[in-house]
Image: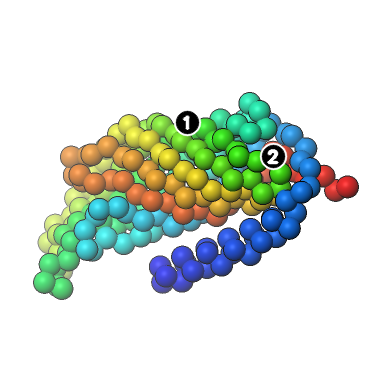
């Protein structure tokens, strides 16, 4: 199932980026405010052999101080599983739901139709984990929450109102999970902001 999701995201990105490159020479009209809406794949990093990727969703309002630099507030939710499989029958780990509230900045390398960008952010990550130790049946399950300061690095491109990005999220250690970092691959749309002229 997870491979179908990743393959579908890759195919869609290739299709839309090809369209964007064909329109690369068109001029843009500068509009400072926009909202990015994205969904994607969240991949836990360093979580053990039983770790599984999950889904994420993002709302990020932005204001462009210049056509090539925008400040934003990223509101993201990501769900994934971290754990270790023992003897092919036992599982020990936690199912996590991460919420984050980050101040972000993106620098665009081009003002044309195809716009690669580099970005970073910092803020608060809220980690909610349901710890589970199980064999043939659940033996223990505890729901724990914690909030930590963290950061994010990202790169990607925008093409028209389409956006593709890859983000590395660095989350502080919690009492119930020492490894909270994760990678996000996102597809989204930009509502508002710059647009192509029709002429």
Q: Secondary structure at mark 2?
A: loop
Q: Tell me which numbered mark, 1 or 2, is placed earlier along the sequence.
A: 1
Query: Whole-percent x and y of residue 21?
Result: 69, 56
Number of residues whose C-alpha sits closer than 10 Å to that of mark 1, classed few (under 14), some (14–19) or many (20 or more): some
Left or right: 49 with respect to 197? Answer: left
The residue that label 2 is drawn on is 111
Q: Residue at x 23, y 39 (%)?
A: 173
Q: Nearer the viewer, residue 50 or 26?
A: 26
CB within 8 Å, label 1 to label 2 = no
Please tell me whether residue 100 is drawn above or below residue 82 in the rendered image: above
Horizontal arrangement in the rendering, residue 66 relative to residue 41 (left or right)? right
Which residue position is annotated with label 1?
103
Q: Quadrant of residue 140?
A: bottom left
Q: Quadrant of the N terminus?
A: bottom left
Residue 20 image-quadrant placement: bottom right
Question: Residue at the spot x=30%, y=52% of the render?
Answer: 45
Q: Residue furthest right?
A: 199
**Label at residue 118:** none
Instruction: From the image, state whether disc 1 or disc 2 is nearer to you.
Output: 2
Percent across and percent down for residue 64 are 63, 30
x, y percent for residue 66: 66, 28
How many numbered marks have been drawn onto this rendered protein structure? 2
For image coordinates 56% across by 52% down, the residue present is 164
Look at the picture and state if 39 lies above or below 9: above
């Amino acid at each position: 199932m997870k491979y179908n999701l990743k393959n579908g995201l890759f195919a869609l990105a290739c299709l839309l980026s090809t369209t964007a490159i064909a329109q690369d020479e068109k001029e843009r009209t500068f509009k400072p405010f926009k909202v990015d809406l994205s969904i994607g794949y969240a991949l836990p990093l360093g979580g053990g052999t039983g770790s599984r990727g999950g889904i994420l969703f993002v709302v990020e309002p932005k204001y462009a101080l210049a056509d090539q630099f925008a400040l934003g507030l990223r509101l993201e939710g990501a769900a994934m599983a971290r754990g270790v499989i023992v003897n092919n029958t036992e599982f020990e780990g936690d199912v996590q739901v991460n919420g984050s509230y980050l101040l972000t900045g993106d620098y665009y390398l081009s003002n044309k139709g195809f716009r690669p960008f580099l970005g970073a952010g910092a803020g608060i990550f809220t980690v909610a984990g349901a710890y589970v130790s199980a064999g043939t049946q659940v033996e223990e399950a505890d729901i724990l929450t914690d909030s930590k300061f963290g950061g994010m690095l990202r790169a990607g491109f925008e093409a028209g109102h389409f956006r593709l990005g890859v983000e590395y999220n660095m989350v502080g250690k919690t009492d119930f999970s020492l490894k909270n970092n994760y990678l996000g691959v996102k597809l989204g749309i930009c509502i508002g902001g710059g647009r192509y002229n029709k002429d």
